[in-house]
Image (cartoon, rainbow, N blue to C red):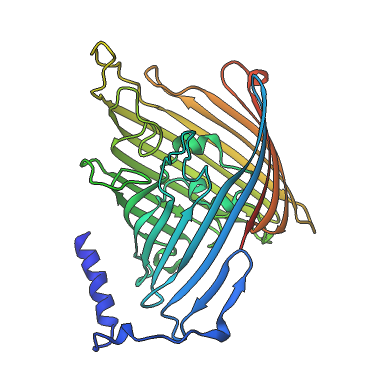
Amino acid sequence: MNVLLFHFAFQVAQAEDSDPNSNMTARSVNVEDMHYKPGKGLVISSTDGDFTMITHLRAQYRYTLESEDDLTHGLQLRRARLLFEGNVFGRENSYKFELAVSPKDIGLKGDGSIGKSPLLDWYFDLSHYRDITVRMGQYKVPYSRQRVVSSGNLQLVDRSIANAEFTLDRDIGLDFRSKDLFGLERLRYYAGIYMGEGHSSYDEGDLGMMMLGRLEYLPFGLFKDYSEADFNRYDTPKLSLGIAYAQVEQGKGNKGIIGSTPSDGGTTDTNNATADLCFRYSGISIDSAVFWREGIRNSGELVDELGVPLPIEPARNGMGYYLQSGYLLPKSNNELALRYGQIIPLGTDTSLNKTSEAGVGLNHYVGQHAYKIQGDVFQTWDDNGFTNGVTQVRLQMQMAY
């Protein structure tokens, strides 16, 4: 790995001018090419194209009506995002910086304290070779497809319960990847190593790491498969298949690098696997994934008020899946969407509980995902049965600009 990084740095240095100050001279802004693109933001670039900055804002306003034991409701600013992206010192060196500042984004608590850093992403991509791009920084690890899909590009108001349980979310590290391996327009890969501390890590930790690999095969060619709904109304079928495996050592959360701290205060070593598909054709979209996780607990040192060690909390061993489909009505900006999913415990020594969800949604796209109004109704239930579950009605508007 160190050899590859050194090779990348050497190639960048070779491409520079012999004058050590040449890259630091002022650049003229290409005023004629400066433009605003709805949903993308304001694009500013230097005349030579070596420096580009795109500014982007996004907000989601959500109303939720929920019925469990009592009827409750609330209106919230669910997500509020500020994003900068572009390239520096050449077109091959790109970056992304994103802040999340809504109360839910920062984990605001009742006492006014903040649960996590507002910094979502800050990473650099070094794309000097088609088959090996290096990404380094903090970002969503390339494990589960629906988690990597932006929350702004979802077909239903939020992600599935299976993804929420088994995702690996964000971490700090680096990976090697290719958007088009061998130039075949059929293959992608990702191979990464991360600190295993998760989002908001700010200090040195133990030697527990996270490693993952992911492969994707697109038999009918490349297409926009990391955005839900078929706005292109493809006239030929499009399919993307993905598989991934990840190993987490000494994970601090009960879900690996996310989740709450186990009651005994220990860590968990987990093996994680997933497979997914994305299908698009003529306004029809199908997205599905299956997840599996098995963990081994490393007991903590927490004790009760009598000094007795607390019982070891079992790992959250289990599997999950979801099947989601949508249809963008002909000559219309309206879409009907459906989803069914489950979380299933495996083995007798697990702290997972069986949970199911079923829901239907209706979307009106004013400006595709950039400006949309979404509504859905979901029922979530456990072993007590469908009629004894939680009913949730959600209405959400998003603007991205």
Is residue 125 in view?
yes
Q: Where is residue 377 in the image (x, y as percent from the top left)?
A: 69, 35
Front-lying residue, 7 or 235: 7
Q: Where is residue 393 in the image (x, y as percent from the top left)?
A: 69, 34
Q: The N terminus appears in which quarter of the rendering? A: bottom left
The count of marks equals 0
Q: The C terminus appears in which quarter of the rendering? A: bottom right
Tell me: residue 254, above or below residue 23. above
| Residue furthest front as drawn | 111
| Residue furthest right as drawn | 331
Front-lying residue, 322 or 104: 104
* 360 left or right of 248 in image: right
Q: Which residue does the image show at 37% across and 65% down from the upper left?
A: 125
Question: Quarter of the image holding residue 379?
Answer: top right
* 33 left or right of 376 in image: left
Q: Position of residue 283 (x, y in %)?
A: 70, 54
| Residue furthest bottom as drawn | 19
Q: Position of residue 132 (x, y in %)?
A: 34, 65
Tell me: residue 390, above or below residue 270. above
Question: Quarter of the image holding residue 301?
Answer: top left
Q: Which residue does the image show at 39% across and 59% down from the upper left?
A: 122
